[in-house]
Image (cartoon, rainbow, N blue to C red):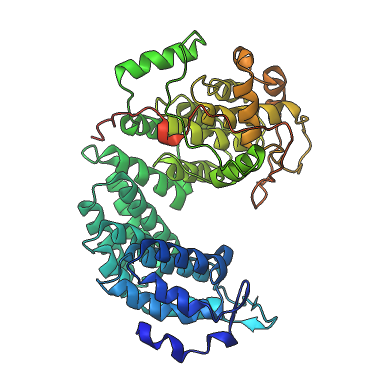
Amino acid sequence: MINDLESIDWASMGHAYGPADDVPQWLHDMALPDAEVRERAFSNFHGAAHHQGDVYPCTVASLPFLFTMADSLSTPDRASVVALIVSIGREAVDRDGLGSVWIGPDGQESTAYQDAAALIRGRGEAFVGYARDVDARVRGASIAGLGLFLDDAEQAVGVLRDRLDAENGITERLLLVRTMGDLALRLPAARVPVRAWFDILADGVAVDADVRLAALVQRARCVPEFIDDTTVPTAIGLLRRITPIPRPEESMEEDEDEGRGPSGPCTCTAEAGPDPGVPGHVAAAFADLARRGRVHAPTTSLLVTFHEALDARVEDRTALLCEQLRSPDAATRYDAIDVADGLITSWRGDHTLLVRLIAECLLQCDSYTSAAAAEVLGSLGRSPCRTGPGSPRRPRRHPPHRARARCVGEPARRAAPPDMSSAASTAWARPHTSPSPGSRPCSLSPVVGETPGDGTSPSTWRSSTPASPS
């Protein structure tokens, strides 16, 4: 079918940057054996024909060709094709509401979202095959599609149950349970069997801890009234069982860091420096943009969902965050910093303990985590205390690379975190407000020089041994 690309009048359609006559070349290049050419084709398609999640008529016209590539075993990167279809379908389904009117690039009303949703749902059976594919990457990319595009609740529940028994990776298992929750929220006919399945998994002593935690969270998400005083303590116990455990020699090093005692020079592997032709502060700014929204621990998205389900239960959320911030796993601690910031700046309460735990993330040999912690502490200290209802949530005013330059360049301040006393005092009475959509603003500052070359990044965090999930 890829040979039929020229039979479509692509130039009559548009995408984010003009006429869509370049789309057929991108589709053609996605099937080529050259990995660099394929990567460029996917990037161009995402950036124009699926720009920021938008769906255009040219996006809809591309779907039959994408399905053909996904179905063909000769396609070099079928997983990326399936992931692209799922991404298009997710946006289409989310915006395919009754009475929805969308305006296309030409200023006219567009039915692209409705058309894409109908086309992908019509091919829903394809995702059953993808979920059973021999390629693990294809299976992983297709899981979300089972909850989005299958309209037969009994079939979807059965496929997801089978896949959970067959998959071994923690990421895939958590995604399968998440998808079951999506299915229950989308299809009323699925709610009773899904709820019964969550009960079996969450309460099953013989079930692996990662699956039990996922089921407990999804049950809380789908049936909030089921949350009680035992929910969070049970979740914390399960989280401890699946958290990677540092080796003994690493624990001793961390104890030295916590005591702020001398630990010698940093032995982290240095990361590649920026392009010599790019100013340091510009390179740091782009590196910061690349970090925005990055998830480092496989349990993070699950725990974020748990916080959303707990909502106004501030004490429960604080207890959960304390566990995350004290975790022996560096990735878990890093991801918890932003969640803690959101709780502190969105709900009233005594958040002093959370502020202190964030301060303990200022590790001498991990400037990547220190940057995020210093940014939150500094912004809390500068932010006035608001007690009136409806006050807007405070955006971060400085990107992490600026905080990183500050905390790395001034090691003498490690014993006294920036604005710690002020941050602690401002952490008491925060109003409940809804987080504003969109990313936080990013500004450049002449204070920032070259990116610190201590080499600390997620890729150089200490290796760890996973705890037994059973």
Compared to residue 141, the image places residue 117 above or below, namely: below
Q: Along the line of sight, which residue is nearer the eye, 47 or 202?
A: 47
Give the residue drawn at x 23%, y 64%: 133
Q: Residue lying farthest bottom?
A: 7
Give the residue drawn at x 65%, y 46%: 435
Q: Residue lying farthest front?
A: 277
The reply, left or right, for residue 400 in relation to residue 79 is: right
Total label count?
0
Give the residue drawn at x 43%, y 80%: 119
x and y percentages locating residue 55 in the rendered image: 55, 73
Residue 346 shows in the view: no
Quarter of the image for the C terminus: give it.
Answer: top left
Quarter of the image for the N terminus: give it.
Answer: bottom left
Compared to residue 170, the image places residue 364 above or below, namely: above
x and y percentages locating residue 391 in the rendered image: 76, 41
Q: Along the line of sight, which residue is nearer the eye, 402 or 350?
A: 402
Residue 257 shows in the view: yes
x and y percentages locating residue 74 in the rendered image: 25, 72
x and y percentages locating residue 246 in the rendered image: 33, 23
